Image: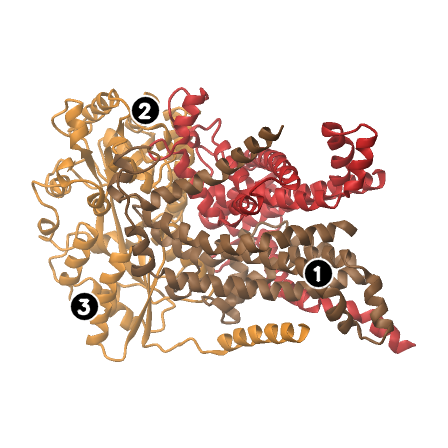
């Protein structure tokens, strides 16, 4: 009996051991080291570190204008990217689910952006936005959005849309795949039954599709929002946070602080602040999800 | 299936373990040199010069690590922090004080005192790489700024000569910008653009000094704000492309060869990439425009070779630096990269008086032009140049801050940094 | 309505393919025409020089091989290890489960930039910096959390009853897993392989920071070599990029239906 118990007690840990080992050594230990930088005045080149306690945290709270600015930018960057990725991703998923001629060929093509390395996405779109080499300024001019064919990325009021458009291009396939899978789980019988009751088209979408997909939608949005908030590469390549910090998000600010200013201590403080905010967000969404699933 | 999977995982881990055990040679006769301003052609030349050194010094083997410019600073500092210390590194001027104050760079002074360098080095060659009187790096060439201009566009705008004075600069920019789709000046508003602001501020001030006798920044002087106003107006009036606000080196150069803008404030090594894409007759160079007192202070930057304090074989490393800087090697090096060489009398070989190099040749000879050297000894200068100046410069160009406020903010920063530097002595 | 569907699909196709087409155009445009011709849909003359330079003169075949080794090994490693963990998370109720899940989640929330320097130190310590093996280990660790969650969903989707029946018939748990459950999860395994392979194939930051020698570079890091201080060799870069897209696209075209199938199976139950 006791032997049976120990085995039952230990078994999951055998399966989990390799994962835990990898994550502990290569993610958690570095993470804890990284967090500890927050309490030190840390110089990478000389290797000196002086303990400063919470000094760097009070610097963040008291006089860091760039941080509050980049926080607002992060919100905008994440919300706008997420909104369009999700909307278009959902649209695409529903169409793919219906099926059409040539879908076998077209579906993989539509998923291609997902496989493009993110910094290449940035470079590609920089090229597209450039009035000397790219078509977009002329398109914007033709559509009447711009008076002259100019580079969107140089306009501090709208520059953020550049990386956002690139990010939408990149992110649609992810949502499409996730949502397509979720949509396929809804049995057709439900729609058949509903159509007997005279519910179809948009009504069916609102009363059947959306509620039944809600759990997947929410978890995907949750995970993706965190991922996008941390996703700096496209912005670094396209605008480097400029002009005049107008596209600086917290993640790019952290990158600058760590690798341009070589101020790893403060970069770590910024990361902890971001982590903290994301955790609050995650917990809130998690709670909402639980409520919704019990409700549905 | 599970068995195969287990074998696979063990095999991969075993392979990694084998790699980990393999002794990456710590033989002091193996030198490691890191280049940071990498291009494929130059790496070839470097390798051939290193091969020569290996031949002359049997037993020594040299490995090269070529970092690409964009990430070189991060990568090099991580290598050093991680204990993978190279013997010789390529050292841009604005990194020097960071590394020296961190105690990473070996003092070359004793070695240079013992060694005979040809005595026809340019006057201040050792001076440039010195901090508090000790030499930490010896430049391999000078990145001197001049104005490259597009002859075709100038002709179309009805301008005969490149700008001689600051007023010419402004007026030419205005005239060229009247042409459709063309701008006067390729503004370098992104990372690396600080030296243009410094040039225009010191030139309008009429002195190439950054600090007065009391250690106060010269950017407090009215000329500095006037200089910033001038470039702000060029941008505000549309004489520079709108997106140049965020341009880095690459974009200014491609803006120039694409014919978007007609004047480019650049170092001569940019010519190598212009040659590939433009006809030689279509562009030329001139010295930087003169300020109100008839002088101009083009920026002189350098990149050199430094030996690391943690090198396992400093003697060989010094010798290698000496070898790379021999007259013959320096000539080939400067020619290939298009730099002002460190030996006297070599410039004529590289810059043709009546060709594209005219601007640089004249700058080195004509007393109206004095070099402006950044206060590279200040440990804060790299960060200030690459972040502060870029961000606040952009804010100024966009009209969020006035030139006066901007000049004062920079002066405040520099004065404080200078005070800290003096206090540390 | 029917036409509307095709209109929307065409719009999606245009949006997806146009930037890729533009890169293709750039890769075929001779350097001198790139800027002088202005913005045109197709250059007046095309050249394959850039492709020649990338494939024959440069180190790109090496980069591709390195990338392939790293991505494939990582994908297989992660899928195996994550299958075990996912199985445990799906089939067992145990103390500490919440803690494990929280740990996995938190690793996803931290900006990668912060851990680069510490990981570099770990790799130096175990002498695996500047080597493909080191890169594989790091990629494995960083792709595990998401893969564990994925695999957990797939196992949730496979019925426990069959497995229990097999165990009552005398199979050990591992045998039951191998004979009954794994075959049911094949699409899911394919999906995980696909996710991880793509992620590893396109990862840049670690590859850039941890690899110095040309001979060990993966393709995204190698492509940065086209960016020198003064100029970007756009033509060659575009050519390299188009070439790099080909293997991923083929792989992806093959694997994407498993991804959808796998995710569907997983979600059905969960």
Work out how far the residue at label 3 is from the one at label 2, CA to CA, in angstroms. 49 Å
Q: Secondary structure at mark 1?
A: loop
> What shade does chain A have?
red
Percent position of residue A178, x then y: 66, 46
Percent position of residue B154, x then y: 17, 27
Q: Residues within 10 Å of mark 1 (few under 14, many from 20)?
A: many
> What shade does chain B have?
orange
The numbered disc on residue B115 is 3
User: Which quarter of the image is occupied by the N terminus of chain B?
Assistant: bottom right
Is residue B134 visible in this depiction of the protein?
no
Extreme left residue here?
B354
Q: How is the image coloured?
A: by chain
Mark 3 and mark 2 on one chain: yes
Give the vertical position of B165 relative to C119 (above or below).
Answer: above
Q: Residues within 10 Å of mark 3 (few under 14, many from 20)?
A: few
Is residue A169 visible in this depiction of the protein?
yes
Query: Circle 1 is placed at which residue position?
Result: C185
Mark 1 and mark 2 on one chain: no
Query: Circle 2 is placed at which residue position?
Result: B229
Q: In the picture, residue C92 is in which quadrant?
A: bottom right
Work out how far the residue at label 1 is from the one at label 2, CA to CA, in angstroms. 68 Å
């Amino acid at each position: 009996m006791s032997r049976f118990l120990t085995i039952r007690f230990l078994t999951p840990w055998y399966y989990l051991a390799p994962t835990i080992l990898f994550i502990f050594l290569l993610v958690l230990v570095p993470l804890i080291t990284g967090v500890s930088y927050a309490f030190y005045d840390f110089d990478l080149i000389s290797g000196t570190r002086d303990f400063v306690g919470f000094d760097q945290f009070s610097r963040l709270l008291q006089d860091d204008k760039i941080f509050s600015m980049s926080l607002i930018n992060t919100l905008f960057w994440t919300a706008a990217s997420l909104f369009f990725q999700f909307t278009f991703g959902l649209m695409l998923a529903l169409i793919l689910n219906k099926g059409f001629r040539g879908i076998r060929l077209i579906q993989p093509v539509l998923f291609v952006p997902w496989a493009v390395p993110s910094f290449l996405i940035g470079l590609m779109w920089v090229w597209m936005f450039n009035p000397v080499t790219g078509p977009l300024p002329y398109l914007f001019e033709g559509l009447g959005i711009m008076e002259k064919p100019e580079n969107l990325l140089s306009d501090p009021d709208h520059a953020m849309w550049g990386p956002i458009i690139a990010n939408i291009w990149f992110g649609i396939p992810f949502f499409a795949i996730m949502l397509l899978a979720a949509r396929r789980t809804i049995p057709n019988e439900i729609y058949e039954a509903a159509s007997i009751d005279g519910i179809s088209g948009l009504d069916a979408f609102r009363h059947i599709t959306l509620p039944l997909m809600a759990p997947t939608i929410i978890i995907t949005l949750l995970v993706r929002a965190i991922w996008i908030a941390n996703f700096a590469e496209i912005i670094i390549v396209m605008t480097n946070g400029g002009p005049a910090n107008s596209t600086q998000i917290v993640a790019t600010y952290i990158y600058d602080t760590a690798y341009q200013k070589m101020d790893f201590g403060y970069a770590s403080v910024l990361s902890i602040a971001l982590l903290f905010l994301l955790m609050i967000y995650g917990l809130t969404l998690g709670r909402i999800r639980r409520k919704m699933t019990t409700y549905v | 299936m599970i068995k195969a999977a287990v074998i696979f995982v063990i095999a991969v881990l075993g392979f990694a373990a084998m790699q980990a055990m393999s002794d990456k040679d710590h033989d002091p006769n193996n030198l490691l040199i890191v280049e940071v301003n990498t291009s494929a052609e130059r790496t070839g030349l470097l390798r051939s010069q290193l091969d020569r050194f290996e031949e002359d010094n049997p037993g020594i083997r040299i490995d090269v690590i070529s970092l690409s410019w964009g990430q070189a600073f991060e990568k090099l500092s991580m290598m050093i922090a991680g204990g993978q210390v190279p013997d010789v590194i390529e050292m841009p001027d604005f990194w020097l004080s960071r590394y020296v104050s961190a105690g990473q760079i070996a003092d070359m002074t004793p070695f240079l005192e013992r060694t005979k360098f040809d005595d026809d080095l340019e006057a201040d060659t050792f001076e440039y790489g010195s901090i508090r009187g000790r030499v930490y790096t010896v430049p391999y060439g000078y990145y001197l700024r001049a104005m490259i201009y597009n002859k075709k566009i100038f002709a179309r705008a009805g301008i005969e000569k490149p700008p001689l004075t600051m007023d010419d600069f402004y007026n030419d920019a205005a005239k060229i910008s009247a042409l459709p789709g063309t701008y006067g000046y390729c503004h370098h508003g992104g990372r690396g653009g600080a030296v243009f602001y410094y040039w225009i501020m010191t030139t309008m001030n009429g002195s190439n000094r950054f600090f007065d006798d009391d250690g106060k920044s010269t950017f407090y002087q009215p000329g500095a704000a006037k200089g910033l106003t001038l470039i702000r107006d060029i941008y505000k009036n549309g004489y520079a492309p709108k997106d140049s606000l965020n341009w880095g080196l690459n974009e200014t150069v491609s803006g120039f060869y694409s014919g978007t803008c007609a004047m480019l404030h650049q170092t001569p090594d940019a010519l190598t990439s212009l040659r590939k894409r433009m006809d030689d007759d279509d562009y030329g160079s001139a010295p930087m425009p003169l300020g109100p007192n008839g002088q101009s202070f083009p920026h002189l930057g350098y990149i050199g070779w430094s030996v690391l304090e943690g090198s396992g074989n400093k003697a060989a490393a010094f010798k290698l630096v000496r070898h790379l800087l021999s007259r013959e090697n320096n000539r080939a090096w400067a020619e290939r990269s298009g730099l002002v060489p460190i030996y006297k009398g070599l410039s004529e070989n590289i810059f043709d008086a009546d060709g594209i190099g005219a601007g640089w040749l004249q700058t080195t000879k004509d007393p109206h032009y004095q070099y402006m050297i950044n206060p590279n000894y200040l440990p804060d200068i790299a960060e200030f140049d690459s972040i502060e100046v870029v961000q606040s410069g952009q804010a100024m160009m966009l009209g969020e801050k006035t030139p006066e406020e901007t000049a004062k903010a920079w002066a405040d920063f520099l004065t404080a940094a200078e005070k800290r530097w003096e206090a540390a002595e | 309505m029917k036409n509307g569907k095709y209109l929307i699909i065409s719009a999606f196709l245009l949006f997806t393919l146009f930037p890729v087409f533009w890169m293709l155009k750039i890769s075929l445009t001779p350097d001198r025409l790139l800027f002088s011709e202005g913005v045109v849909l197709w250059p007046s003359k095309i050249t394959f020089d850039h492709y020649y330079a990338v494939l024959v003169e440069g180190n790109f075949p090496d980069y591709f091989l390195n990338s392939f080794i790293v991505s494939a090994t990582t994908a297989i490693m992660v899928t195996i290890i994550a299958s075990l963990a996912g199985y445990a998370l799906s089939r067992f109720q145990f103390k500490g489960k919440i803690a494990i899940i929280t740990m996995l989640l938190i690793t996803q929330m931290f900006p990668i930039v912060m851990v680069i320097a510490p990981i570099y130190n770990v790799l130096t310590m175990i002498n695996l910096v500047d080597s493909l093996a080191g890169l594989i280990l790091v990629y494995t660790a960083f792709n595990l959390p998401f893969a564990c969650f994925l695999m957990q969903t797939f196992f949730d989707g496979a019925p426990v009853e069959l497995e229990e029946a097999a165990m009552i018939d005398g199979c050990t748990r591992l045998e039951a897993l191998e004979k009954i459950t794994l075959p049911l999860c094949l699409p899911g395994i394919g999906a995980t392989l696909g996710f991880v392979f793509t992620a590893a194939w396109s990862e840049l930051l670690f590859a850039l920071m941890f690899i110095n020698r040309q001979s060990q570079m993966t393709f995204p890091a190698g492509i940065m070599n086209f960016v020198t201080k003064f100029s970007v060799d756009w033509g060659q870069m575009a050519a390299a990029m188009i070439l790099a897209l080909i293997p991923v696209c083929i792989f992806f075209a093959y694997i994407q239906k498993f991804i959808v199938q796998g995710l569907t199976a997983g979600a059905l139950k969960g």
